[in-house]
Every structure is written in C-alpha cells, then in structure tokens.
Image (tube, rainbow, N blue to C red):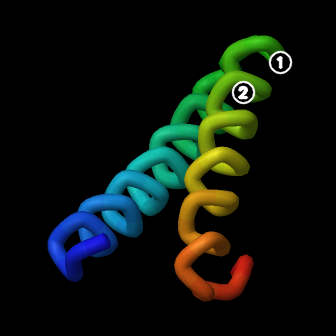
Amino acid sequence: MSFRELDDLVLHLKGLVLVRKLRERNGAEAGELAMYGAEIERVHESLARYGLPHP
C-alpha cells in the first residue's frame, strides 16, 4: 500500500467518525449509527493489516 492510499484510508476514517458524531447529535436512528460503526470498524481492520494501532 502506498503512502497516498494509507493517507486516504486515514482521512476516510476521520470523516466517518465526524459524520457519525454529527448524525448522533442530530438524532439519527440506531440503525444508521450502526452502519457508520460497522464501516469505521472495517477501516480500522484495514489499517491494522498495515501495522497501525487501533485508537
């Protein structure tokens, strides 16, 4: 994986976390928040494959 791809993955993760927090604050349903949570976990797993720790 190139540095650019890794950087894109980290940026994607940050965006997901921010959007989930925003949606939670605005009263999103549990199913929507779970969808974001699942995608965040998938990205964490991708980062872990490259030796980056889970925050």
Task: Work out how far the residue at label 2 is from the one at label 1, CA to CA, in angstroms.
Answer: 5 Å
Dot 1, crowdedness within 10 Å: few (<14), some or many (≥20)?
Answer: few
Left or right of residue 8, residue 26 in this image: right
Q: Nearer the viewer, residue 15 or 28?
A: 15
Q: Nearer the viewer, residue 6 or 33?
A: 6
2 and 1 marks in contact (CB < 8 Å): yes
Above or below, 4 relative to 3: above
Q: Which residue type does callout 1 highlight?
A: Ala
Q: Residue furthest front?
A: 1
Picture residue at 71% right of the left edge, 49% below the top: 41
Picture residue at 48% right of the left edge, 52% below the top: 18
Q: Residue furthest right?
A: 30
Dot 2, crowdedness within 10 Å: few (<14), some or many (≥20)?
Answer: some
Residue 30's tag is: 1
Q: What is the quadrant of residue 35 in the picture?
A: top right
Above or below, 26 relative to 32: below
Picture residue at 61% right of the left edge, 87% below the top: 51
Residue 33's tag is: 2
> Which quadrant, please, contains the C terminus?
bottom right
Helix, strand or loop at disc 1?
helix
Helix, strand or loop at disc 2?
helix
Q: Nearer the viewer, residue 20 or 1?
A: 1
**Position of residue 40 measured from the top left corner of the image (x, y, whole percent):** 63, 47
**Position of residue 8 measured from the top left corner of the image (x, y, whole percent):** 26, 62
Above or below, 40 relative to 48: above
> Which quadrant, please, contains the N terminus?
bottom left
Residue 3's tag is: none
Q: Which residue type does callout 2 highlight?
A: Leu
**Position of residue 53 measured from the top left corner of the image (x, y, whole percent):** 68, 86
Left or right of residue 15, residue 28 in this image: right
